[in-house]
Amino acid sequence: MEAIEHPEAYAARLQAAARARTLDGWALPEADFSPQPIRRVGVIGAGVMGSGIAQWCAACGCDVVLRDVNDAVLARGAEVVRGLFDGAVRRGQLAAAEADAGFARLRTTTGWDGFDGCDLVIEAIIENVAAKRALLDELSRVAREDALLATNTSALPLEEIAAGRPEASRLVGLHFFNPVNRMPLVELIVGRATSRPAAEAALAFAHRLRKTPVICRSAPGFVVTRVLFFYLNAACRLWGEGVPTGALDAAMQAWGWPMGPMRLIDEVGLDVTDFIFGEMAHYFPDRFARTAVCGRLLAAGLKGRKNGASGGFYVYAGREAAPNPAVTADCPACDLAADEIARRLMQVMVAEARRCVAEGVVHGEADVDCAMLVGAGFPPARGGLLFDAR
C-alpha cells in the first residue's frame, strides 16, 4: 500500500520545490531577445502595490526608478517605501545602515528619466486593458529594446494587454501579492507570445527576490485570484441569503483559514472585490453570477479597511472588529450549520481549482496547492487545497 504523505510535510515539500522551480516542461517560443542581468528596475504606479514592489526590489539590491504622473501619489509612495524599510529595522530584519542604503537605491520621477537604463520595467497601474495598452505605447518609445517588461495584473490575460504588439515576446506577468515584503508568492504568467528568454529572465528575478514562483499560463484570474474570488462571491451569496457575517467567518476559521471571507473582503477592499467580481463575470459568464452585495455596500459609502477606511462588513476601532450592525441582508437570518457553510464554500473553491488544472493554466495539482498555500493562506495543516480534497 502506498504511504500517504503527511499534510504538513507535503506543504513544506511543495514550497521547497517552488523555490527551485525551472521552466522544464513549458513549451515557449524562442526569440531574438537577450535580456540583460536585472540591476535596475523601473516601477510604474506608486500606489500600494507599486510602492511595495519598489521597496522589495530595492531591499534585494536593485536600483529602482518609481514613476507616477501624480506628484502627491508619488510622494506618498516614497513615504511608504521609507516606512517599509523602517519597519524592517524595528523588527530586526535589517540594520539601520542597510535600510538607508536600500532607500538610497530608490529615485522617483513624474517623467521617464531613468527608464532608458532599466533592465526590467514593471507596471502596477489600474486594472484596465486600455490603460495598460496605452502605457505600452509610451514604454515602446523610452525603454530599451532588450528590457524585460512585466505587468502586475491580478486577472487580465496578457494577450489582451499586448495583442499584436512587438513587445509581446518580452512581456510577462509578475503578479505580486500584498503586502509584497511579507507575501512569498509570485505568479509568473507566460502568454502565448512570451518568449523563453523573457520567461527565464523573469523566473531568475523572482528567485533573486527570494519569492516562491508558481508558473501559470495566461488566463483570466490565473490561479489565486480566480479560485479565491469564486469563493468570495459564493460567500457573498450565502450572506445575501441571510447567513450572518460572524457565522460565515467563524465557520471558515474553524475549518482552518486564518481569516474568514467577509473579513478578507474588507481587507482587500470592497471596491477591488466588486471590480474583480465584474471581471470574473465577464470572463466566465456561464458560471460566475456576480453578487450585488459589495456594490450595495460601496453605494452606502463603505469600503472596508482599504486606504484607511474603517467600515464594511465589520466596523473597526484600532485592532478591534465587530460585525457592522448597519449592514444586513434583505432576508431573515439563516441558521446554517458551520460545517455546511464550510462544505459549500470549499466545494466552490475545489471545483474552480480543478478547472485550472484541466484547462492547463498550471501543470498540475501541486502548483495549485502551492499557490493557495503561499498566496491565499490555505492552512498548511491540511496540506493543500486539492491534496485535502482527494
Image: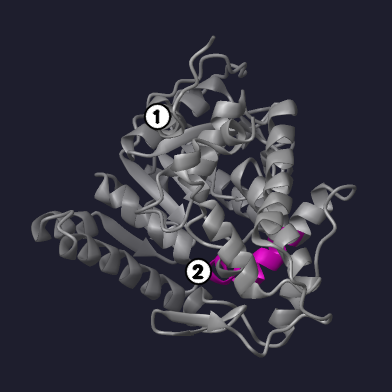
Residue 267 locus on image (x, y percent): 53, 69
- The magenta segment is 264-277
Residue shown at 56% from the left, 53% from the top = 255
Residue shown at 33% from the left, 40% from the top = 209
- Camera-nearest residue between 44 and 85: 85
Q: Residue 350 carries which label?
A: none
Q: Quadrant of residue 71?
A: bottom left
Quadrant where the N terminus is found in the figure: top right
Residue 235 locus on image (x, y percent): 71, 62
Residue 263 visible to the viewer: yes
Q: Would you place residue 312 above or below residue 43 in this image?
A: below
Quadrant where the C terminus is found in the figure: top right
Residue marked by disc 2: 69
- In the orientation shown, which residue stands out farthest toward the top? 1
Residue shown at 39% from the left, 79% from the top = 319
Q: What element carries label 2?
A: loop
- Camera-nearest residue between 314 and 229: 314
Residue marked by disc 1: 9
Residue shown at 81% from the left, 71% from the top = 241
Q: In which quarter of the image is residue 94?
A: bottom left
Q: Would you place residue 213 above or below residue 330 in this image?
A: above
- In the orientation shown, which residue stands out farthest toward the bottom? 326
